Image (cartoon, rainbow, N blue to C red):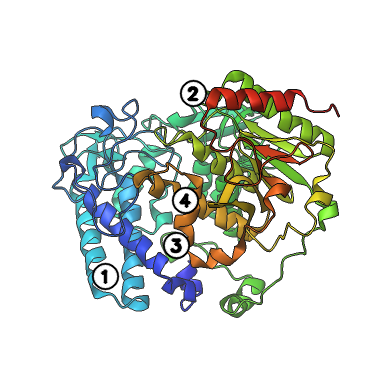
Amino acid sequence: FFHASFPFHPVLREREVKEAVMIMVDVWISEQRHEEDAYPTGELFDCVHCGKPYRYNPKELKRNGKGTITNSSVGLTWSGFRPSDDACLYGYLIPANMFAVVVLGYMMELAEVIWIDESLMKKARQLREEIDDGIKKHGIVKHKTHGRIYAYEVDGLGHSLLTDDANVPSLLSIPYLGYKYDETIFANTKRFILSKDNPNFHQGKHDGIEFTGIGSPHTHFIPSSIWPMAMIMEGLVSNNATDKVILVEKLLASSAGTGWMHESFNPNNPMKFSRPWFCWPDSLFSELVMSLTEECPKPERGRYKVKEWTDTVVVNGSSAFSQPTPVPPPPPPSLEHSSLAVISACIPGKRFSADYVNASLANKQSFCDKWGATCILSRENHDVENPTYHAKWEKLYQINRTLHTSDADWIMWLDCDAAFTNLAIDWRTHLRGHLDSSKVLITSKDKNGMNLGVLFIPNTVEAHEFIDELYEMRHYVEKFPNTRDLKDQAALTELLKAQPKWAGLVDATVPQEKINSYLDNSDGHRWKSHEWIAHQVWCQKAEKCSSHFLSILKNLKPL
């Protein structure tokens, strides 16, 4: 859609766009031979889990996370999971392969017209032909009642799963996806998936309205549930305006007066539903309503096509899009009127005892209570996707999450071994002239350089981007560890090497005594009792250091 609407937009020529396409093509080619443990290689595949065959949770995929056996010679490309996030029974998901055929056609056009890359164009075309041939040879089966139909999943060895799931891509959505299907086979398939022969087809009645449609095992906790998404898709692929109107009316009734499309609902009681707000079917519902115009496809026009968007604002805005007029962001509030979120993570273990953790987090909460700041305090590691990664990454996880969820103007981080030692200090007055919202990171230096034990980040779009990139750098640091076992500081060093644009936006000029005085360490400014923060950085005598830290917090003057 973007290329069709803005064929010469410069974003299409960005290196990252082409590389993303190259990665997809190479992954799909490798997954044609999933059974042989094939995996893509090359300079673009430098992620943590690259360089080895794909595996997932063995509790969800058989054979220790590899999935059920598939035939590598059929041309189809493998999937571990359906659009619903449920595991595939057989590895070749036919609707997904159909979608890949369509998308590979788009990739061919981009390679030929935008990037002038004949090699990529030929590679995409060959893959497209192989997958399409595999669908025709292995994705069509004979049903005893409905005749030749498209299967939902196959393994290329003669096994197939005959069903359809509400999530897109689905068999019902084949015309919507733009795949060149066999009309007789699709008609048979549609008849099958909208009948009781489909295990995921459900029906019910409420307030005199009969609901029928496709559900998903993903919402098994609501018996016989129907997904509005599937009802919407039934309307989108229909050429019958009357059927579309009836479906719109039923969809409105299924919303149970909430004003939103849900993930699923009980057809006998729509008040029982999952996800009170689900943007995916909301968007599809809007498209269904848009198709109810004089442009609504008529039988003589053949199969359904997505109605062209003719809103005059969008059409007239196309030139403005290609040459956007910059809109400056609203000015940040003055520091006197700014809000603050304070973040800290203390994960109990060898370094931090339970008493240490409790005292540290209670200290930060006292500051928040005194100055009306929001406290975000953690005692556990949340990076469950990378359980072997160091707990120090919790810092960037929490900062990144807060930037995406908090309305605070400033984010302040303190390590577990840093604490407020003068709660009477007003942070706004104390830091006047030092917090610049045009920067993305503000901190201080010791004798060795920047120290990120205490830092400030403005809640701006640019800072969001910076922290996103800094957090992603953890994969590189874990793969190539440094001798000092630095984590976030090593990630910052590597990011500034890779993206020099950030160097001028990182400010480490705040005097250390303002925000990061050291306890028991001579590498920086030594803490004095009247100062705002004490940081017990790199203390070698753990037991003595802990006692010192706890005694300071215990003897703080009450508020």
- The quadrant in which the C terminus is found is top right
Pick whichever of labels 2 and 4 is earlier in the sequence.
Answer: 2
Examine the image and state in which quarter residue 71 appears.
top left
Pick whichever of labels 2 and 1 is earlier in the sequence.
Answer: 1
Pick whichever of labels 3 and 1 is earlier in the sequence.
Answer: 1
Question: Label 4, on which residue?
Answer: 491
Examine the image and state in which quarter residue 537 appears.
top right
Query: Could you tell me which secondary element the residue under label 4 belongs to?
Result: helix
Tell me the distance, in whole angstroms, between the alpha carbons under discs 2 and 3: 33 Å
Q: Tell me: 260 left or right of 244.
A: right
The disc placed on residue 121 is 1
Pick whichever of labels 1 and 4 is earlier in the sequence.
Answer: 1
Identified by mark 3, the residue type is Lys
Identified by mark 2, the residue type is Lys
Tell me the distance, in whole angstroms, between the alpha carbons under discs 1 and 4: 37 Å
Q: Nearer the viewer, mark 2 or mark 1?
A: 2
Q: Is residue 298 above or below residue 212?
A: below
Tell me the distance, in whole angstroms, between the alpha carbons under discs 2 and 1: 55 Å
